[in-house]
Image (cartoon, rainbow, N blue to C red):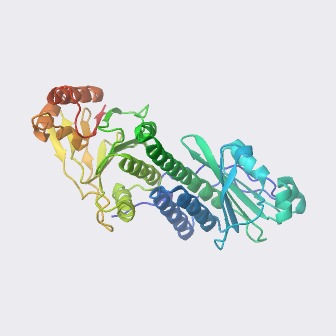
Amino acid sequence: MKWTWPWKRAAAAPAPVAPARGASRPVEEPSTILTGDATEDSRSLEILLDTIAAVTANIDLDSVLRDIVDRSLQVTRAERAILLLGDAPDDLAVRVAQDREGNALAGELQWSRSLVRRCLEQGMAVRSVVQSDQEALELGQSVYDLKLRAVMCAPMRARNRIVGVIYVDSRAVRREFSARDLALFGAISAQLAISVENARLHADSLEKVRLEKDVEIVRRIQQHLLPPVPADLPGLQVALRYEAAEKASGDSYDLLKLRDGRFAVMIGDVSGHGVGSALLNHSVQAALRSYLELIDDPAVIVTRLNDRLSQSVEAGKFMSMLLAIIDPQRRTLHYVNAGHPGLVLVRGGEVRVLEKTGMVLGVLAGQAYEASAPVALQSGDILFLHTDGVDEAKRAGGAVFGADRLAQLLAKTGRQSAEGVLREVEAALQAHLGGGGGEDDITMIAVRLS
């Protein structure tokens, strides 16, 4: 297996960064993670990937916050790091503060409030290199008092909402935060914000369950976080059906338009239902989105997800997943199927079930997953993805809908739109169930090539 470093393709754009202020000499802009130095770039991306994987697997808020501070110090090599939660300059509260040796910062903390305010007002990562006492005073009395020489701050944004900031500084005369430092810091802050939001949602949901004995809050969270069908997908029609058997579903999906015009579709199913399965699904979804920004090879993405799940999920818990990458321009498909119901290709009146490529996730660490060979697509082809709640839908009396019935039905829908295909399957399922609900979650996605 081989995966391509982003400098060998169209690189994912880093988080937006603001020009440095308070510096006595011009600083190169725009910032970028990639420098052209293979060793340094490899280190930067490995740090970013490890950070993504580590924090998305953790849903304990205090642990996540400590990990964010540790990793911020590791990435920037700063002397201090402070994590503040809140969405406005006057509402920020310090949650974690420590030095490079891991010691908690005691007493009344000082930091460059003007830089933090600018970071929040502009909504982007900012830095300053201080060359004189006058410049220090311009950045705030705290910068002058602490004799700081390099300061950097990045917002943590989740679902278009700022949840806090990460702030680092250094007194070392020779330590200046570079454009590359700022870009990497900004990129990591975006993923860390997702982890903070996950941990907050987890803590909130558990508290609601304990106090109210009601998981309705979890269903609302999950519905809020599941993505809609993207608008403007040239060359593709996409339709979706999602129905949870309980208030919190074990099914998961994602639909993501990639920067180079390709389209990524993921569908998965965590064993069991309820709060734990729903939150695990969202953690996987967050990590998957970050990986897709950095890695071309879907096999490497799924392999990394499996390693993290194997280390973090409880015994007996696992997840099936199908990740498909569709290129509507070249009319090709690559996919990895980790123990999930088969991807169905409908061409005219013919139905072909594409084979699995590996076992379920979260069982065996170190398992190397493989992607399929390229699958050539044609205009009018339909790809049908589903969870086992479709073909295993059981009506009173014990009869299941069945894979054969599903294939026969899809064979008759070859000329339908993506939405039309799902309407036909949905109607057949309701007729089979006699108007009642199924025992399992049901997720269906249809993609048609124009």
Q: From the top left corner, tell me how far across and down residue 236 is, in percent.
A: 34, 33
Say left or right for 34 vs 166: left
Q: Which quadrant of the figure contains the N terminus?
A: bottom left
Q: Residue at x 14, y 31 (%)?
A: 409
Q: Does residue 71 sit above or below 59 in this rendering? A: below
Residue at left offset 19%, top offset 36%: 346
- The quadrant in which residue 4 appears is bottom left
**264 on left or right of 131:** left
For the question of whether residue 24 can be seen, the reply is no
Considering depth in this image, is 181 or 399 the residue closer to the camera?
399
In front here: 161 or 208? 208
Q: Seen from this angle, which residue lies furthest bottom?
A: 101
> Where, by quadrant of the figure, is residue 135 drawn?
bottom right
Question: Residue 43: where, in percent of width, then height?
Answer: 53, 68
Q: Position of residue 399 (x, y in %)?
A: 10, 37
67 and 177: which is toward the camera:
67
How far across and how far down the image is residue 400, in percent? 12, 38
Q: Is residue 143 visible?
A: yes
Q: Residue at x 53, y 61 (%)?
A: 63
Q: Where 127 falls versus 421 (above or below)?
A: below
For residue 382, side relative to residue 121 (left or right)? left
